Amino acid sequence: MGQSKSVFFILVLVLSFILMISVSESIPVGMGIGSEDSSPVCNSVHGAESGETCSTVATEFNLSLQDFTNINPNINCDAIFVGQWLCIDGSA
């Protein structure tokens, strides 16, 4: 009788652990107060040309550098390559 109780206890622990993992993985990271979808919206793109930088593209399309990087959040300004799609009109 004692061994069946310990097997039952272990089974309950394992199932509880699995349930906790599945529930925790289904919760979006940004949940909470003030967490609206803040993904930038891009309305127009430009294919990078040879010699362009974040600054030159921002200037060409009348954007501040801050606005340009806000609508291109994953850009690496040190490694822009020819043909890379850059957002030139949008909102963050």
Image (cartoon, helix red, strand yellow):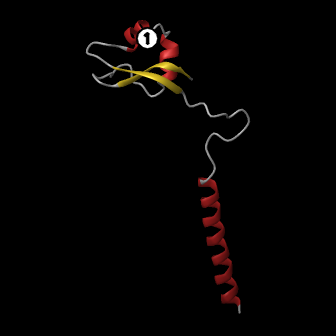
x and y percent of residue 87 in the render?
A: 44, 22
Q: Which residue is rendered at x = 64% and y = 65% of the image?
A: 19
43 on left or right of 34: left
Q: Quadrant of the N terminus?
A: bottom right
Extreme residue in the right direction:
33
Q: Quadrant of the C terminus?
A: top right
x and y percent of residue 39 in the render?
A: 56, 31
| Label 1 packing within 10 angstroms: few (<14), some (14-19), many (20+) | many
Residue that numbered label 1 is attached to: 58
x and y percent of residue 22 in the render?
A: 60, 60
Give the residue type that dot 1 points to.
Ala
Q: Which residue is rendered at x = 52% and y = 21% of the image?
A: 90
Q: Which residue is rendered at x = 72% and y = 32% of the image?
A: 34
Q: Nearer the viewer, residue 45 or 36?
A: 45
34 on left or right of 82: right
x and y percent of residue 35 in the render?
A: 68, 35
Q: Residue 18 falls in which quadrant of the image? A: bottom right
Reply above or below: 4 against 46: below
